[in-house]
Image: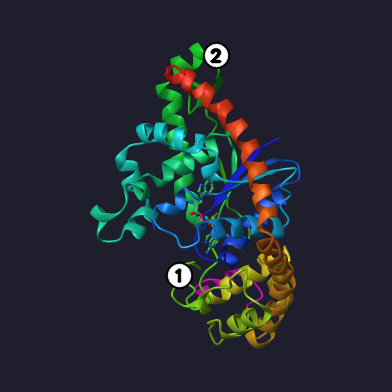
Amino acid sequence: KELVFSGVQPTGNLHLGNYLGAIRKFVALQEGNDCIYCVVDLHSLTAQLVHDDLPGQIRSIAAAFIASGIDPEKHIVFNQSAVPQHAELAWIFNCVARIGWMNRMTQFKDKAGKDRENASLGLLAYPSLMAADILVYRGTHVPVGDDQKQHLELARDIAMKFNLDYQDHIRRAGRGIDITVGDEPVHAYFPMVEPLIEGPAPRVMSLRDGTKKMSKSDPSDLSRINLLDDEEAISKKIRKAKTDPDGLPSEVEGLKGRPEADNLVGIYAALADKTKIEVLAEFGGQQFSVFKPALVDLAVQVLSPITGEMRRLMDDTSHIDAILRHGGERARARAEATMKDVRDIIGFLY
Ligand code: TYM
């Protein structure tokens, strides 16, 4: 059994990129794996300190998980701040990671913008908390969109430096396993994290500009499909989506240099659980005037049951809160087992 971990921030409305790049994969991975899915509320303070309705935002992400088909009894659904061990391990990882590693993160550079001196220290340390989220459960497999790839490489670097620096301590505490890294034997405590990014829509692009990522922060609501959009909004946004004048190619190579067409075909494929090749076998040679209505029908068919269930769940806050509480208790027990080992390895008295 693999340990799957992933997280979603409770900021803004969830959109189709979050669903296809992440949540849909969370659902599929439940079969045969042990999964932990987290609403990362501590992370949501890095960009914006004060939130109007953080409890509501946290509940809406949990509702999206459940409405999409995650089973909170077989697997664990909880919010990050309910398990203080995440922050405890993050502190240790802050001391493992180097400032240079953090400064190289493209998401930090984008989010901090020109005025880097004024970015929060939390925004810089963000990837270290993310590594702690996964490794406090000794997680091995992490389903995410393409934009998280660099953060997961950093999580591997942090795990490896901890393993190497504490090799002798890990041996003394009797807690590790022998692995080889390159040709070097290493006595490791933390496993190497494996990102799960593949699929037809690892990076869903804006409906207004095929070179920009679909994002919560785009000022144009026409650029994204929100998980809470109704049928009419979905239909309008897809009809208005930018395209080029040509019809659809019959081969995937024909999508090169056509980012908007590529994006819509990828979205269709991901929603239909098909490959782009299969989608083009069906629609190759057709105009967008034929493809777009088919995409609207498919998107509505897949998304509207989720939207309906999400709304229903969000109305019953006590039910969602009970799920989160139950998940938090189970997560805490597991995270504490890891932290006991880590405190022993480091040499803290407790
Ligand atoms: P967040 O909340 O920004 O996004 C949640 C998930 O959605 C994916 N995603 C996309 N996928 C495809 N196309 C897009 N346009 C798109 N936009 C977002 C993201 O890749 C992500 O998988 N740092 C993370 C949260 C996090 C986490 C973790 C993830 C915290 N700790 C530990 C995995 C493991 C984030 O901000 O995701």
Question: x and y percent of residue 48 in the render?
Answer: 39, 58
CA neighbours of label 2 inside 10 A, class few (<14), some (14 to 19), many (20+): few
Q: Is residue 256 magenta?
A: yes
Residue holding disc 1 = 212
Label 2, label 1: how far apart the Cα atoms are:
49 Å
Can residue 285 be seen here? The reply is no
User: Along the line of sight, which residue is nearer the eye, 115 or 62?
Assistant: 62
Q: Quadrant of residue 266?
A: bottom right
Question: x and y percent of residue 264 in the render?
Answer: 60, 74
Residue extending furthest toward the front: 318
**Is 158 on the left or on the right of 99, as rendered?**
right
Number of marks drawn: 2
The disc labelled 1 sits on which kind of residue?
Lys
Q: Earlier in the sequence, mark 2 or mark 1?
A: 2
Q: Is residue 340 above or below residue 295?
A: above
Task: Tell me the element at label 2.
Answer: loop
Q: Is residue 65 magenta?
A: no
Residue holding disc 2 = 174
Visual colour scheme: rainbow
User: Along the line of sight, which residue is nearer the eye, 207 or 11?
Assistant: 11
What is the span of residues highlighted in magenta in the rendered image? 249-259
